[in-house]
Amino acid sequence: QLQLVESGGGLVQPGGSLRLSCVASGFPNNYYAIGWFRQAPGKEREGVSCFSVGDGHTYYTDSVKGRFTISRDNAEKMTYLQMDLLTPEDTAVYYCAAGLNFNSVNWFSPRMYDYWGQGTQVTVSS
C-alpha cells in the first residue's frame, strides 16, 4: 500500500525555523518525485518544493528560494523540508505528495501527483 505521512508542523514565531518530514512507504522504485505543497485558508494549493528521487534534482517556488531547503534520505525513504526565516505568509497546511510519472516542467501542479499525505499545520505568528 502506497502511503505518505507528514510530521513536524507547529507554531513558530516570525524569523523562526521548522523542519517537516515525509515518509513514503510502499513505492516500488526510485523513479518518482516527492513534492511539498501548502494551502492557506481561502487559497489554492500551492507547490512549494519538489525532490526528483530518480535524479536528485530539486525545485522551489520563488517565494521560498533561499529560505526553504528540500532534502532526501533514500535509505529511510524520508523527504525533509527545512524552513527558515519563516513569515506569517508561510502559514498554511503543508502536504507532501508523490508523483509516479514525474514531469519536471509541471512540478508545481497538484495534478502531477498521485498520492497525498494528510497534511500538517504550520502557523507563523508572534
Image (spheres, rainbow, N blue to C red):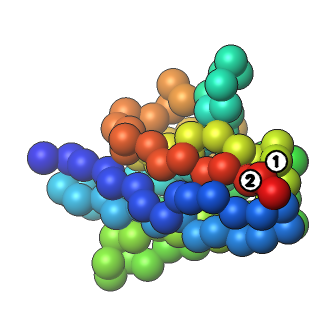
The image shows residue 45 at horizontal and vertical percentages of 62, 28
- Asked whether the viewer can see residue 51, the reply is no
Which corner quadrant holds the C terminus?
A: bottom right
Looking at the image, which residue is at 72% across and 71% down? 17
On screen, residue 9 above or below 96: below
The image shows residue 65 at horizontal and vertical percentages of 84, 59
Which is more toward the observer, 61 or 88? 88
Classify mark 2: helix, strand or loop: strand
Rendered image: mark on residue 42: none
Q: In this view, does 78 lie to the left or right of 42?
A: left
Looking at the image, which residue is at 34% across and 63% down? 23
**Residue picked out by circle 2:** 124
**Residue picked out by circle 1:** 88
- Asked whether the viewer can see residue 91, the reply is yes
The image shows residue 5 at horizontal and vertical percentages of 33, 54
Q: Residues within 10 Å of mark 1 (few under 14, many from 20)?
A: some
